[in-house]
């Protein structure tokens, strides 16, 4: 009898949950990302959703990269999100860098035109070994190019820029007179802060977490 009461209580608790449609920001056309379950709209706030980049832009060359969104508001059963960054698998990076290749890691923070602070981590691979001075030249050229580009962008434009092809073309053009670049990958981007209103999320929210969408 006690077991039956426990099962009935669990079923009743599940019935109290609601389904919510989680959508991308307007700068990604408000595309539906996934469905989520929560007891109230407030319980959805702060939850993070992780999806393959290819699901959003249809570019299957990006199958190794995943985007992270965080729920910032819910109206009814619709939850809106903010782009929080993306990441590339470590295994893919290791396969990319082979013997007799030179790897240059660049980690740089930028500020968008709309005053959001972001960090971009990228890997550049060249054929053969480089002198220290060449590495410095490449690093400086890339940082200067990306600073100029990103500082003139809104945060929405940055979010699209960092997962699309234009950033690769800009880096190639910035370095072509220094040394030929064989491979470039943006291995991670992270949103650090913004002028927008902070997300109303309690640290004790037991339903918050990262939902990975394959």
Image: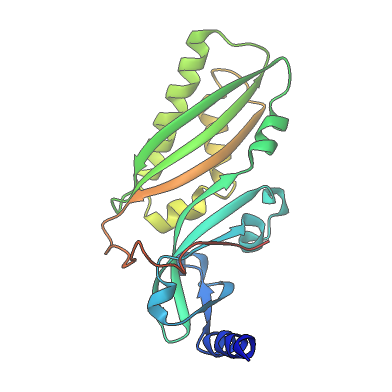
**Residue 47, how many percent across, how many down?**
46, 66
The image quadrant that residue 52 belongs to is: bottom right
Give above or below for 76 relative to 38.
Answer: below
Give above or below for 109 relative to 46.
Answer: above
Give above or below for 205 relative to 137.
Answer: below
Left or right: 96 as drawn, with respect to 130: right
**Residue 160, how many percent across, how many down?**
51, 55
Residue at 60%, 37% (x, y): give it: 185
**Residue 180, how many percent across, how many down?**
63, 21
Q: State the count of labels.
A: 0
Residue at 65%, 30% (x, y): give it: 183
Q: In which quarter of the image is the N terminus?
A: bottom right
The image quadrant that residue 31 belongs to is: bottom right
Residue at 44%, 46% (x, y): give it: 190
Residue at 69%, 26% (x, y): give it: 97
Left or right: 150 as drawn, with respect to 176: left
């Amino acid at each position: 009898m006690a077991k039956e009461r426990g099962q009935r209580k669990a079923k009743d608790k599940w019935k109290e949950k609601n389904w919510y449609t989680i959508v991308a920001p307007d700068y990604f056309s408000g595309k539906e990302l996934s469905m989520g379950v929560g007891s109230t709209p407030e319980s959805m706030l702060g939850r993070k959703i992780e999806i393959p980049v290819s699901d959003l832009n249809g570019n299957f060359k990006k199958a190794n990269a995943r985007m992270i969104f965080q729920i910032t508001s819910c109206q009814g059963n619709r939850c809106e999100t903010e782009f929080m960054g993306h990441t590339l698998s470590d295994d893919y990076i290791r396969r990319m860098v082979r013997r007799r290749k030179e790897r240059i890691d660049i980690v740089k923070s930028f500020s968008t035109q709309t005053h959001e602070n972001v960090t971009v981590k990228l890997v550049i691979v060249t054929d053969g070994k480089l002198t220290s001075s060449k590495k410095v030249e490449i690093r400086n050229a890339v940082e200067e190019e990306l600073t100029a580009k990103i500082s003139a962008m809104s945060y929405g434009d940055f979010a699209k820029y960092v997962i699309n092809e234009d950033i690769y073309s800009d880096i190639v053009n910035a370095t072509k007179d220094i040394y030929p670049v064989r491979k470039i990958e943006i291995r991670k981007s992270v949103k650090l802060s913004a002028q927008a209103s902070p997300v109303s999320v309690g640290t004790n929210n037991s339903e918050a977490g990262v939902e990975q969408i394959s």
